[in-house]
Image (cartoon, coloured by chain):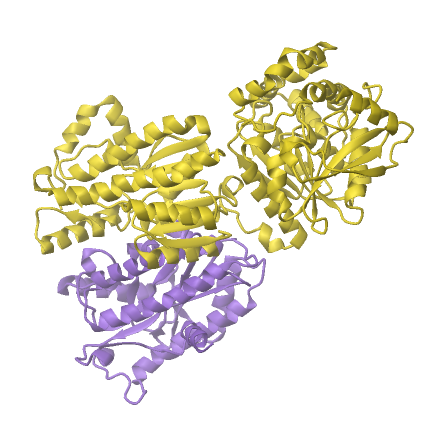
Amino acid sequence: MNTVRGQEQGRGQGHGPGEGAESAGAGGAADGLRGARERRVRTGGIELCVAELGDPAQPTVMLVHGYPDSKEVWSEVARGLAGRFHVVLYDVRGCGRSTAPQPLRGGFTLEKLTDDFLAVADAVSPDRPVHLVGHDWGSVQSWEFATVRRTEGRIASFTSMSGPSLDHFGHWIKQRMARPSPRRAAQLIGQGMKSWYVYMLHTPALPELAWKGPLGKRWPAILERFEKVPGGGYPTPSLPTDAAHGAWLYRDNVRARLRRPRADAYAHCPVQLITPTGDMFLSERLYDDLEQWAPRLTRRTLPAKHWVPRTRPDQLVSWVTEFVTAQEEGDPAKEAAARGPHADRFGGQLVLVTGAASGIGRATAFAFAEAGARIIAVDRDGEGAARTADMARLIGAPQAFGEVVDVSDAAAMEKLADKVDAEYGTVDVLVNNAGIGLSGSFMETTPEDWKKVLDVNLWGVIHGCRTFGRRMADRGQGGHIVNTASAAAFQPSRVLPAYSTSKAAVLMLSECLRAELAGQGIGVSAICPGLVNTGITSTSRFTGVSADEEKRRQAKAARAYGMRNYPPEKVADAVLRAVVRNQAVVPVTPEARGAHLLSRFAPRALRAIARIEPPL
Amino acid sequence: MASVTSVTPAEGGRLTAELRGFRDVQRLAYACAEAVAAQLKPGVTERDAARMQRTWLRERGVRDWFHLPFAWFGDRTAFANFRIPLQFFPTHRALEPGMAFILDLAPVHHGYTADIGYSGCLGLNPVHDRLLADLEAHRELILREVRERRPLREIYEDVERLMVRQGHTNRHRAYPFGVIAHKIDRVKERRWSPTLFGFGTQSLKGLAADALHGHRDGWSPLWSPYTFSDHPPQPGLWAVEPHLGFRGTGAKFEEILVVTDSKDPQESAFWLDDDLPHVRRWQEEKAA
């Protein structure tokens, strides 16, 4: 590799900045980018390795990698985008198969990186502006591209992840230093601690030695262990030199820019900001005032760690596609589609809700629809499910489908999972909500009654988690499972033995599954609503009484729940919140929260309540 | 009221003079709503809209009110976060493109009362269109069940069940006593007609008198979900106002339902007027 680089550098000598030349290279792309067309672009005395995928007639999406990476970090994302766009990736100077400037010091300034970008953009898309996507240092430099004058008209949109503009960062620090309220001081200290590696990189020679020595060797294992980055063609063997050269990105820019941030760093293109919430290196608070710098800002949040191009490629492909398409079509109505709470988190995600024809399931489907998610409404009641899907589309779901399935039927659920996988993709959020009620003393509950309740309430959840949860885990890109348990899961009652048993099982199942899937970035939440005004009361079975009496009790229960009038919409809000915060057990109504508290501190009080027979 | 309750309503499509009086004031009220709705544009506030309705009707001889005109814009059409009745009164909320609105007015003209609700939206609002379309089933359901002489409370619950099945929430539950309808009647014309919390004192007096009589005879002039409405429909004129809500958008209609003591189901209950904006809209949609 070193000899090759030497030759390339030799060839590159003599070209002044700004003047570009290109030479087509045949094949030779690394594993991850098989099938990419490669060319070399000369600029500013160096030669950049540029890879292209997809149809050049389509809009150009340019992916810029970070530190210590090479363009191969994008391989999964590039493959996903190549079907619809002309995807261009290049190795930043000094990284991968691009050559490094000589001398290194002063060769990595943002001005020179902007030259590189313009040279590549002119080579691959001379007539049309490109859509930029940057990760980490790729995003830092893309912010520079998107905010300086000379690139105006060359950038159609910019998607930023895990890389703030150094100018915005500088202003962010200055503001907090100037008026350090306790909160602002805490933000400052928090980010200061996350930036430990930046200080390390400023020490001379040591980082290079470490990267070329033990750190370079152990880096893939470190990534896999702490960042959960799967292997497979990444990192590339060029890592030690990428990382050693890349240290100059920090040394050439960070101090200068943070000390004297530009005052006019306004983005001249629409910006999509993707914030991983688990980023070890960057605080979410960095982007608090970003609207001021980027007026046309779309926010997205992703529960993931720093290396999202490796760990969440599908989600990135979907968001980049949506954003770029919206800019290309210039349809203002499309941008305003989803405005509900948590739209930054669920926009474009696939959400499957069982029991979605009524009550909590339907309200949950609507809440996700308002957040811009794609909805699959599953229920035994086909008409109700179709209606839910229909209304979901009205309020912001880009797509919504109704499916008729009995959740207690294992084969049917398996079939549904196959169909969903094939037609709509992997489910991002699964809500196992379908349930039925059964009231009556234990002695009067027949084995058939037991079977019916457990089939729907427990086996329905088991089938849902087994079929959809398995596919979610196999994809390995995170997700969330929500199971609707009940306050009856911890509140015993003499009139609800079967129902409470089934819900207690769901609660424990959720907790166990949560432990099992925690390592794979999949959260599991159990929702315990309490008394909510839904149709479950009028369809509940009452054992040991005549049909007329059952009807009377159903009506009475429905009225009582109507008087309580806790709306299912509030439970739906709690579901979304539980997913966003990855909560384990969520009691919703005040009585459910009270019972949850008592179950831990005064279980005898609950046992006393359990002996009361409610007047129905 | 005797003339209304024993009326044979539509002898060849002709109403008694009494019912014609009510129909005329209802038409006047809908004309007002349509005229005001046509003038609404971005920036107009609820207070402006309410004032426009008042002025329009005063110019045409209205001196007394069952209640002063209301106007609700945006998510206030679904009574989002309404806690106290004062929130029903018009606010400074300004109309924006795509917003739904509801005008609710109840003028008294020549001693006849009408109480109507008019839903519309400024520009395109697919959710609002769906709500309006879904209201049609409620108009049919209410008439059918009143003709079957079902207890009002049961009809109320059936309406609510239909709303839930449609995916909507019942927003008339937010009205005082959660009423879906209330009785209206003729009122005496006085030179001075003060209002109390937006309601005409004459009309309130009539309602109170009805409530007293009803309490003795086991019925109520308020059609609510509570036990005091657990009786068959009482002959008279009912202003029926089913109100749907869906995720921050609401829609309603309100019009007079005539209930008589006739044995013939067709004549035992009927909508006073079928030539109303929302009914015409449904017919046009069917024709299209």
- Relative side of A551 to A416, left or right: left
As drawn, A194 above or below B258: above
Give the position of the N terminus of chain A as an image quadrant: top right
- Relative side of B40 to A92, left or right: left
Looking at the image, can residue B83 be seen?
no
Residue at 27 percent across and 40 percent down: it is: A459
Residue at 29 percent across and 58 percent down: it is: B160
- In which quadrant of the rendered view does residue B19 lie? bottom left
- Relative side of B90 to A255, left or right: left
Q: Nearer the viewer, residue A494 or A445?
A: A445
As drawn, A606 above or below A443: above
Residue at the right extreme of this rendering: A14
- In percent of width and height, residue A408 lies at 27, 45
Looking at the image, can residue A506 be seen?
yes
- In percent of width and height, residue A171 lies at 70, 27
- Relative side of A186 to B23, left or right: right
- In percent of width and height, residue A516 lies at 38, 27
Q: Nearer the viewer, residue A202 or B66?
A: A202
The total number of labels drawn is 0
As drawn, A591 above or below B142: above
Q: Nearer the viewer, residue B143 or B47?
A: B143
Residue at the bottom extreme of this rendering: B12
Residue at 32 percent across and 55 percent down: it is: B173
- In percent of width and height, residue B266 lies at 24, 80
| Colour of chain A in the image | yellow
Give the chain ID for the purple colour: B
